Image (tube, coloured by chain):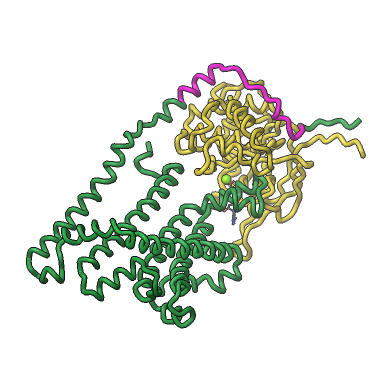
Chain colours: A yellow, B green
């Protein structure tokens, strides 16, 4: 065996993805390239329709690029959807247990692990609740616990807090940051909210729209823990927002 | 030595749970605010509130019937009143003949229904899964479903003579298309998001079907089963009137016997029996359906 020091957990290399053909052809992603280091928190920022979900789908292995490659070095990739996508016929615990059931983890192990994971997202003791009995924020936390139940090394999150009220979202930012630091997973976090990206990310990959390209990559470099309403975050958010507007503005004429 | 800079696949096994802090307390507060549920009324009250409208409807129906009898539209030996019919039914249910006829009918219904479920499920799955099969037979299923079951009897009698098999044949043909259609539309309408979700968690093929597709399709499958039962029951009643197997009394043959003896009271009593069985089976399906919807948060009374 050759000793290779793998400096990146995710390597996205010249990935393009087109949908349809002829006049209906949509160029969702065009030569997108960037890396994420192991344990890094990367935010993907872009206007809606710029191919963010498409990129995550490719990373999670449920879609293929039209050209280019993604390399995750054999790591397990989990995907968390915008809508919590809990299965309505299962309890919260049943949802968290599902990925383990699929992998064939024995029942007794599943049960204790479900309790651990629910405690991790501060939902201890709620394993028997049904998704419709939980609030939006709680459902997203169940969904997060379920993503971790896949024993992932790379977690892709597709606008996970987009539908939550501001207060719940801020609290979940703190929770997510804590879990990320404790677990050491690599996170690719998709959002269209600039402040959220600055609040959470080590780096921000700004995508342009139609076709989706990497417009710029920002190093955040602010000390953690951060607050979404701190002046540092606000200042960087202004810079990123200006750049995002410039990208979106190119489509106005 | 290989320098391992990546996180191993089981990195999360040793996750500590963070001590409770401000975030925890605020989150708990939000959770409590957002999940207040109304207490459910006690069981007796729920049963009563589901039952009294049905009882009321029955009473009104019997009253209308009695009014028609009182009006003298038909002589009372042609159209007896509900009192006579009910007391005749009361006498019948104390006899062994009634129960063995009912048992035979129910056993035929069950056998035909189970066979229809097997065939319907297999055909439904095949159509949903393979587009060639769908384009070949998909549209014939609905055509079969709309064919009145009675038109099958001439063929059934020629094929099987006056036997149990003739009845079974028609019951299965009546019920299987509805069940197949329930399975097909159930699978067709599984939200793609759920299928994608199952795939990202590594479920493929049979596992994906068992853990994601089948439960997601269940509501439509149950609807198909319910409709399939209705068709099975109708076909069976038609069959028992037409195909009287010698020495095998049944609800349908008792009904036919009463007609031949010009025993209107008996006809009405047997029809009430058929109706009551229909009501009971419907109640059972509704209970299953309600339970399923309640679990999935689809019942209006349960929503916040
Ligand atoms: N399965 C598909 N078929 C056709 N077009 C698609 C499909 N998926 C996505 N697209 C198109 O690709 C573009 C990017 O979509 P998406 O990745 O969902 O964007 P985002 O998540 O950034 O909002 C959009 O223009 C969308 O219409
Ligand atoms: Mg999207």
Q: Residue at x 7, y 65 (%)?
A: B71
Q: Position of residue A36 (x, y in %)?
A: 73, 36
Q: Is residue B171 left or right of residue A171?
A: left
Image quadrant of residue A19? bottom right
Front residue of B45 and B184: B45
Kindly tell me whether residue A246 is visible in this rendering: no
Image quadrant of residue B95? bottom left
Q: Is residue A132 left or right of residue B91?
A: right
- Where A13 falls versus A228 (above or below)? below
- Where A40 falls versus A211 (above or below)? above
Report the image quarter containing ligand 2: top right
Magenta region, residue range: B8-30
Front residue of A141 and B68: B68
Q: Is residue B9 left or right of residue B105?
A: right
Front residue of A1 and B249: B249
Q: Position of residue B218 (x, y in %)?
A: 49, 52
- Judge whether residue B26 is colored magenta: yes
Q: Residue at x 51, y 54 (%)?
A: B217
- Judge whether residue A70 is colored magenta: no
Q: Residue at x 66, y 40 (%)?
A: A78
Quadrant occupied by the N terminus of chain A: top right
Q: Is residue A110 left or right of residue B123?
A: right
Q: Residue at x 58, y 65 (%)?
A: B126
- Where B216 falls versus B34 (above or below)? below
- Where B216 falls versus A205 (above or below)? below
Q: Position of residue B25 (x, y in %)?
A: 50, 19
Image quadrant of residue A232? top right
Kindly tell me whether residue B50 is visible in this rendering: yes
């Amino acid at each position: 065996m050759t000793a290779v020091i793998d400096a990146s957990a995710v390597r996205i290399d010249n990935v393009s993805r087109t949908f349809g053909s002829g006049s209906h052809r949509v160029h969702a992603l065009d030569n997108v390239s960037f890396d994420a280091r192991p344990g890094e928190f990367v935010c993907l920022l872009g206007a809606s329709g710029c191919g963010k979900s498409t990129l995550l789908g490719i990373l999670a292995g449920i879609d293929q690029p039209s050209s280019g490659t993604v390399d995750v070095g054999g790591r397990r990739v989990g995907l968390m959807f915008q809508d919590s996508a809990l299965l309505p016929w299962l309890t919260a615990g049943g949802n968290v247990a599902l990925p383990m059931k699929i992998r064939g983890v024995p029942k007794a192990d599943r049960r204790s692990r479900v309790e651990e994971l629910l405690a991790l997202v501060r939902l201890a003791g709620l394993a028997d609740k049904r998704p419709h009995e939980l609030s939006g924020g709680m459902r997203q936390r169940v969904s997060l616990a379920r993503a971790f139940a896949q024993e992932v090394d790379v977690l892709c999150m597709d606008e996970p807090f987009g539908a939550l009220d501001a207060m719940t979202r801020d609290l979940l930012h703190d929770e997510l940051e804590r879990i990320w630091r404790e677990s050491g997973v690599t996170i690719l976090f998709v959002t269209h909210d600039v402040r959220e990206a600055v609040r959470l990310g080590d780096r921000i990959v700004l995508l342009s729209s139609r076709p989706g390209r990497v417009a710029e990559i920002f190093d955040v470099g602010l000390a953690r823990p951060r607050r979404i309403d701190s002046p540092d975050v606000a200042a960087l958010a202004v810079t990123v927002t200006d750049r995002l507007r410039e990208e979106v503005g190119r489509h106005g004429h | 030595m290989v320098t391992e800079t990546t996180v191993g696949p089981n990195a999360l096994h040793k996750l500590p749970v963070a001590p409770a802090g401000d975030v925890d307390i605020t989150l708990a507060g939000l959770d409590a605010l957002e999940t207040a549920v109304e207490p459910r009324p006690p069981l007796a009250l729920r049963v009563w509130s589901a039952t009294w409208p049905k009882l009321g409807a029955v009473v009104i129906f019997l009253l209308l019937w009695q009014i028609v009898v009182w009006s003298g539209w038909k002589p009372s030996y042609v159209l007896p009143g509900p009192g006579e019919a009910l007391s005749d039914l009361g006498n019948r249910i104390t006899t062994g003949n009634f129960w063995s006829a009912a048992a035979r009918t129910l056993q035929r219904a069950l056998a035909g229904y189970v066979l229809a479920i097997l065939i319907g499920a297999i055909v439904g799955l095949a159509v949903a899964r393979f587009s060639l099969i769908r384009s070949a037979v998909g549209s014939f299923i609905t055509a079969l479903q709309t064919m009145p079951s009675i038109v099958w009897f001439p063929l059934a009698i020629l094929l099987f003579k006056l036997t149990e098999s003739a009845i079974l044949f028609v019951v299965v043909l009546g019920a299987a298309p509805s069940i197949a259609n329930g399975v097909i539309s159930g699978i067709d309408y599984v939200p793609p998001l759920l299928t994608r979700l199952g795939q990202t968690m590594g479920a493929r093929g049979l596992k994906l079907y068992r853990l994601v597709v089948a439960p997601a399709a269940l509501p439509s499958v149950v609807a198909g089963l319910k409709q399939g039962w209705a068709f099975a029951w109708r076909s069976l009643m038609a069959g028992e009137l037409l195909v009287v197997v010698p020495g095998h009394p049944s609800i349908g043959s008792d009904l036919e016997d009463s007609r031949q003896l010009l025993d209107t009271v008996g006809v009405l009593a047997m029809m009430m029996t058929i109706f009551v069985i229909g009501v009971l089976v419907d109640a059972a399906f509704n209970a299953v359906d309600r339970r399923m919807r309640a679990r999935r948060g689809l019942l209006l009374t349960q929503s916040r």
